């Protein structure tokens, strides 16, 4: 602790941000003077439990306090906020790991992998919008970003170079490997790709990205948004995960870690033309088998299903999974298979990275334990097939609204065990209420369509 405190002080840090993540995937925390680093890393700092979404903690007594205990290895000075360093925290209640802390939920699944000598590596690809408000309307922050097909546009991308370069430098200053930044298929929509890392570290990186992006966008007079689908006629934002399972040490410096998803020929050589080894196929099959329940975590808002239900957009495509299927390099399938890894395309930008990663591990391990096999691969564009065509092929459909997804999650024993009793109960209660409020809301579309019709 002394070495860490001296290192941070040498970087000009005077204040720590004790940061944890609530059930909704929102960063929460408080400022702690650097002088109290030891306390943050040992006992933690206290919060009122009932004030944090999804804890279900009592208003009085010992179990009303939520303690955020810092992980020293995550301490990092923030380039966009000189003098401050983030420390990622785990939740504790009553001196024990809190079962409804999203990071603790993922920790439990990571421990199950570690017991087998394995670890999961993920590469998370968040898409997001940069927005502004004008006359009560939400619009793309760049008023000149009006192309019907703006994907990879090198006219609009440079206009946001101030924000994007600042974001790149901020993340790289925190040790993240930024691979690419690009304009995606909707007006005002962008994407950042990071290098892959162990699942817990990847989720921590995603939260750091969100903290940096919110702050830097606000500095530029914009709003950073990970709302799945802010515009009805535009594609929505996904948060795809590239997934591989490894044996050996997490931080391997001697080449001893081995990707269990890489296929091999009968002579033991790597099959460079192949996609997934048996553990990879079984893991991916588990993800497909639990896709309905996973939807509640991967697409956790009522707005998420505006993205999943979309079949057309101004740019001519949506890139959302149309059915519970997999295919080689098929971006219209739920699982896109590649050499030694697969891309899980179900999660959207509103997903909690800890919960969605924990559920992914649970589903994949169930596939391995039951030795599930993938169904036949699909090569064609599933977005052009339609629901009837998918069902005719025996391809299952994803839930069409949040209520259906919540029901599927409640019925999934594997995912329930992974989430734990408290978090599953609180998550389902909050999301059922969200679905109910949405169903009761009378929209402008309804008024325009029905007010004078009958």
Image (spheres, rainbow, N blue to C red):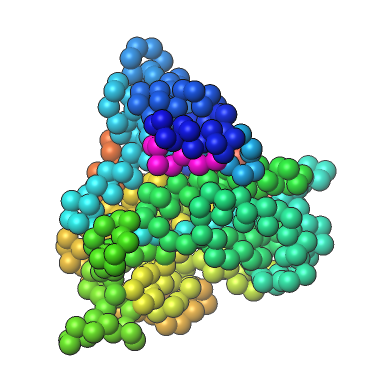
Q: Position of residue 272 (x, y in %)?
A: 33, 84
- For this view, does 232 lie left or right of residue 329? right
The residue lying toward the viewer, choosing from 102 and 260, is: 260
- For this view, does 273 lie left or right of residue 305? left
The residue lying toward the viewer, choosing from 340 and 292, is: 340
Q: Position of residue 307 (x, y in %)?
A: 55, 59
Residue drawn 42% across and 64% down? 242
Residue 373, placed above or below residue 75: below
Residue 10, placed above or below residue 343: above
Image quadrant in which the N terminus is located: top left
Residue 190 inside the magenta-drawn segment = no
The magenta span reads 69-77
- Say if residue 321 shows up in the picture: yes
Residue drawn 76% across and 53% down? 141
Q: Position of residue 237 (x, y in %)?
A: 57, 58
The residue lying toward the viewer, choosing from 100 and 407, is: 100
Residue drawn 48% across and 73% down? 331
Residue 75 inside the magenta-drawn segment = yes
Residue 237, placed above or below residue 62: below
The residue lying toward the viewer, choosing from 220 and 185, is: 220
């Amino acid at each position: 602790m002394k070495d860490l405190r001296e290192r941070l002080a040498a970087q000009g840090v005077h204040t720590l941000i004790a940061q944890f993540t609530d059930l909704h995937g929102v960063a929460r925390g408080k400022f702690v003077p650097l002088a109290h680093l030891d306390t943050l890393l040992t006992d933690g700092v206290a919060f009122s439990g009932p004030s944090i979404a999804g804890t279900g903690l009592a208003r009085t007594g010992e179990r009303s306090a939520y303690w955020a205990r810092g992980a020293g290895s995550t301490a990092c000075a923030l380039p966009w906020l000189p003098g401050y360093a983030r420390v990622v925290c785990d939740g504790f209640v009553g001196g024990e790991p809190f079962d409804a802390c999203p990071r603790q939920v993922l920790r439990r699944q990571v421990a199950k992998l570690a017991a087998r000598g394995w670890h999961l590596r993920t590469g998370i690809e968040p898409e997001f919008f940069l927005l502004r408000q004008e006359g009560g309307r939400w619009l793309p922050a760049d008023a000149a970003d009006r192309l019907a097909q703006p994907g990879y546009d090198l006219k609009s991308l440079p206009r946001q170079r101030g924000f994007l370069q600042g974001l790149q430098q901020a993340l790289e200053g925190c040790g993240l490997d930024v691979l690419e930044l690009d304009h995606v298929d909707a007006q005002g929509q962008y994407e950042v790709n990071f290098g892959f890392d162990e699942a817990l570290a990847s989720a921590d990186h995603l939260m750091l990205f969100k903290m940096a992006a919110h702050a830097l966008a606000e500095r530029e007079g914009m709003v950073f948004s990970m709302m799945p689908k802010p515009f009805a006629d535009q594609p929505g934002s996904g948060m795809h995960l590239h997934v591989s399972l490894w044996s050996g040490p997490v931080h391997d410096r001697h080449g001893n870690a081995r990707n269990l998803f890489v296929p091999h020929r009968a002579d033991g050589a790597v099959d460079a033309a192949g996609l997934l080894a048996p553990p990879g196929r079984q893991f991916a099959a588990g993800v497909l088998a639990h896709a309905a329940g996973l939807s509640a975590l991967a697409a956790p808002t009522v707005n998420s299903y505006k993205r999943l239900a979309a079949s057309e957009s101004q740019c001519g495509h949506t890139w959302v999974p149309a059915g519970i299927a997999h295919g080689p390099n098929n971006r219209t399938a739920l699982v896109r298979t590649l050499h030694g890894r697969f891309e899980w395309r179900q999660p959207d930008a509103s997903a909690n990275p800890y919960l969605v990663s924990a559920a992914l591990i649970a589903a994949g391990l169930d596939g391995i334990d039951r030795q599930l096999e993938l169904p036949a691969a699909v090569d064609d564009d599933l977005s052009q097939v339609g629901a009837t065509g998918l069902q005719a092929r025996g391809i299952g459909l994803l839930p069409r609204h949040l209520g259906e997804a919540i029901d599927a999650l409640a019925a999934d024993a594997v995912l329930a065990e992974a989430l734990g009793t408290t978090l599953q109960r609180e998550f389902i209660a909050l999301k059922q209420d969200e679905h109910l409020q949405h169903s009761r809301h009378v929209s402008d579309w309804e008024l325009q369509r029905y007010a004078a019709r009958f």
